[in-house]
Image: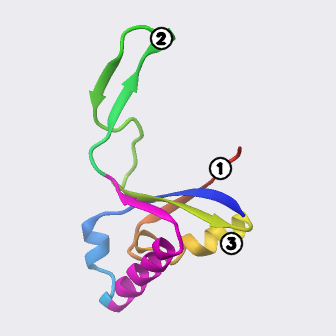
Amino acid sequence: MARFVTIGYGDQAGYEQTDPAVRDAAHAHDARLRADGAVMGIAGQPVQVRRPGGAELTTQTGPFLSSALPLAGFAVIEAATLEEAIEIASHSPCAVAHGVIEVWPLTE
């Protein structure tokens, strides 16, 4: 099986406008993925880390990436193909609650 990183973006307004039954189904979907071994988490406050050329370490609080929607969370999932990973991600809370999910194949 191949591994994929999924990154979910969404906000509270989109979440709240989604039918509660749809949200509950999405959360149940994610619970099944976690039970099957997917690594998932809700995004906290990021810290940028730099050490150019091995020199002095510097950090800065805040995201490097920018998006119209805030970063909500991530998952590392397994799927046979990119298409299967997309199908899996399409049932997650961010995808159904007016957000978006990116699916990134991991190469080794």
Q: Secondary structure at mark 2?
A: helix
Q: Earlier in the sequence, mark 3 or mark 1?
A: 3
Q: Secondary structure at mark 3?
A: helix
Residue span colored magenta: 21-43
- The amino acid type found where label 3 is placed reads Glu
Quick check: 56 above or below 42?
above
Q: State the residue at coordinates (46%, 71%).
A: 34
**Rendered location of residue 52, percent (x, y):** 46, 13
Q: Secondary structure at mark 1?
A: loop
**Rendered location of residue 61, percent (x, y):** 26, 32
Residue 17 located within the stretch drawn in magenta = no
Q: State the residue at coordinates (42%, 81%).
A: 26
In the rendered image, which quarter is residue 78 located in? bottom right
Give neighbour class at mark 3: few <14, some 14-19, many 20+ (Cα, 10 Å): few
Disc 3 and disc 2 in contact, CB within 8 angstroms: no
Residue wearing tag 2: 54
Residue wearing tag 3: 84
Query: Where does the C terminus fall, quadrant-wise?
Result: top right
Question: Foreground residue, 52 or 14?
Answer: 52
**Rendered location of residue 73, percent (x, y):** 39, 58
Residue 40 located within the stretch drawn in magenta = yes
Q: State the residue at coordinates (51%, 66%).
A: 38
Q: In the figure, is residue 84 to the left or right of 56? A: right
- The amino acid type found where label 1 is placed reads Leu
What type of secondary structure mainly makes up the magenta span? helix
Question: Foreground residue, 64 or 36?
Answer: 36
- The amino acid type found where label 2 is placed reads Gly
Mark 3 vs mark 2: in front: 2
In the rendered image, which quarter is residue 82 located in? bottom right
Disc assigned to residue 106 = 1
